[in-house]
Structures are given as structure tokens and as C-alpha cells.
Amino acid sequence: NLSLMDKAKLDWLFKKKVVFCTSLDGPEFLHNNQRVFADGNSYKETVRWLKIIKKKYKTIGYRINALTTITKHSLPFWREIVDTYVKAGLPTIILRFLNPFGLAQKTASQIKYSADEFIDFYKKALDYIIKLNLQSKKIREGYAVITLQKIFGDTDPNFLDLRSPCGAGIGQLAYNFNGDVYTCDEGRMLSRMGDESFKLGNVLKNSYEDLMGHQVVKSCVIASTLEGLPECCHCVYKPYCGTCPVFNYKEQGNIFPQIPTNERCRIFKGIFDYLFLKLQDKKTYDIFKEWWKIQRQNKNV
């Protein structure tokens, strides 16, 4: 997350035209609490390199993106988190809820929250973002933009977490440092917890055909095709949604979602409910339509 970035690395990555995406969890006190850096202030390092990369990449028309991870500690600070992104000059903030992988699982007792708590946070943050837009301060929320593309547009934005089937294997592959290949980054993160259920092979040993024909890829496709899933198949939000087999496997012990108790499902239903509610307001509708137009014109924002 840029903490170990230096000029030599940046020059090499710039030459290869690698697009950057880093973590920025909010204001300094919050980011440092969640991104502990033994050698110093992780927030200051992230923001410093963020500015350098933005300036350098502007010359080739690329943008650097950032992601925020919302923990239990984040919930009271929805305003400050959004303000951090505005101050950094970032056009989009994705209010990401926790996934049950890696460090998040190890510290779940300290950072986890309920779906209802996240939805309450999301509503407050989105309302504030809309308020800023009414004041001509341009910032958008990522999940809203993805959903609005599906509502207003005639093509799917192909966001791999919210499509049917999901992108595991057929839309993405995750490569580990040792060449191991996984269906997705979630599968790679699960392997760090000692579970190789979503490993497809190794780039040094297996062909592309081996990876694509792997039984795990086929299973993920079946388990994430909404048209064949109970409850999902007749849900009003089916055109906008998608399920994650890795999330379901980790949380519910089955790659097929158990919808009545699926927290991810509850969160996205809450987001969709609120977006459609906000669309009924003319001023908000106009802001949302503008977000969609910007995304349609420039995919790399």
C-alpha cells in the first residue's frame, strides 16, 4: 500500500504502465490504526506517494485509484473518510465492507459489524457525498456508480463481484508470488489462511487450458449463476447483483449462497434499496445521471 514504494520501483512500474490502486482508509488516525507500519506513519507515506504518482501518471492519462476498508472503528467517521478522499483529489470512493479473509478474519472480534450497521454507515456516507456534489464538490461512490451503470446503461460494467456468473476464473485470475494461480484474489487470500480450495495450478507447471478447464472454475460458474440459485432467481435485484462463491464458502461452508443468513446479500439489498429510494429525488437523480455519464465517457476514473 505504497509504504515501501521508492523511486526505482515507481520508475519501473511507470515504464510498464502499471495502473496503481492503493488502500486509503480515511484520516490519519484511522488509517494508521488499520494499516500499522513498523517503520513510521503509513498514512503520510501513502498520501506522499499518492501525490507523486498522480502527478507522474497524469502525463499518460492514467489515474491512481484507492480503496477504503470499512471496519467497526470506521463507522462513526463516515464524514471524515469522505473528506479524506476529497482532500486527496480522488474522484471515487468505494465504501468496501469487510470480507472474511486474511487479517480481517484473524481480528474479526475487534473490527466486525453487522449488515445493518454497515448499511446505516453507507446511507450516512452516501447522503454526505450527495450533499458535497450539490455544493459542486465532485466525488462519487463506487458501488453506486456500478449499480447506476446497470440502471441507466444498456451494457453491463463487468464488475466481477456483481455479475452473473461472477468473474472467478472466467473473468480474472490471481497470481501469487510463487506462480500459484487462483480463481480470484479472494481465493488467493484464502490460501494465506491455509485453505487451497480455490487454487487452479501453477503458472510454471500448468497451461492456460489446464487452468480454464479446472473443476473449481466450473463449480464457481455454476454456484454464481443467479438464474439457477434459489431466491436469487426471482429476486427483483437480480439484474444488478452477483454472489461470491469464496465468500459463501468461508462464511457458510458452501459455495452456493444460503440467502436467508447471507450477510453479503443483506448488504447489497440494503445498498440497492437506498439507491432506488434516492433516485426518486430529482436533484439526486440528476447527480446520479451525471455520475453515469462520466463513467460512460471515461472508464479509467
Image (cartoon, rainbow, N blue to C red):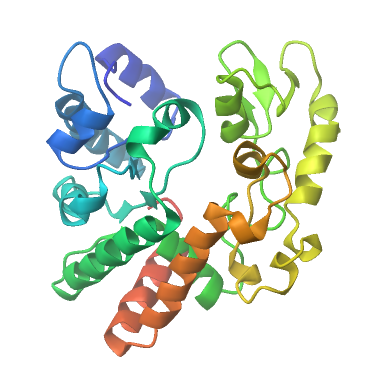
193 to 133, vertically: above or below: above
Q: Quadrant of residue 291?
A: bottom left
Q: What percent of the width, then of the height, locates residue 247?
A: 60, 42
200 to 231, vertically: above or below: above
Instruction: Name the residue located 69 percent from the left edge and 52 percent from the top edge.
Output: 257
In this view, the residue in front, 254 or 233, is 254
Image quarter where the N terminus lies is top left
- 227 displayed left or right of 240: right
Instruction: Name the residue located 22 percent from the left edge and 12 percent from the top edge.
Output: 38
Instruction: Name the residue located 60 percent from the left edge and 72 percent from the top edge.
Output: 237
- 132 displayed left or right of 4: left
- 141 displayed left or right of 77: right
In this view, the residue in front, 288 or 280, is 280
Residue 20 shows in the view: no
Q: What percent of the width, then of the height, locates residue 115?
A: 44, 56
Count the marks: 0
Q: Quadrant of residue 25?
A: top left
271 to 282, vertically: above or below: above
Q: What percent of the width, then of the height, locates residue 109?
A: 38, 34
In this view, the residue in front, 50 or 273, is 273
Q: Quadrant of residue 207?
A: top right
Residue 11 shows in the view: yes
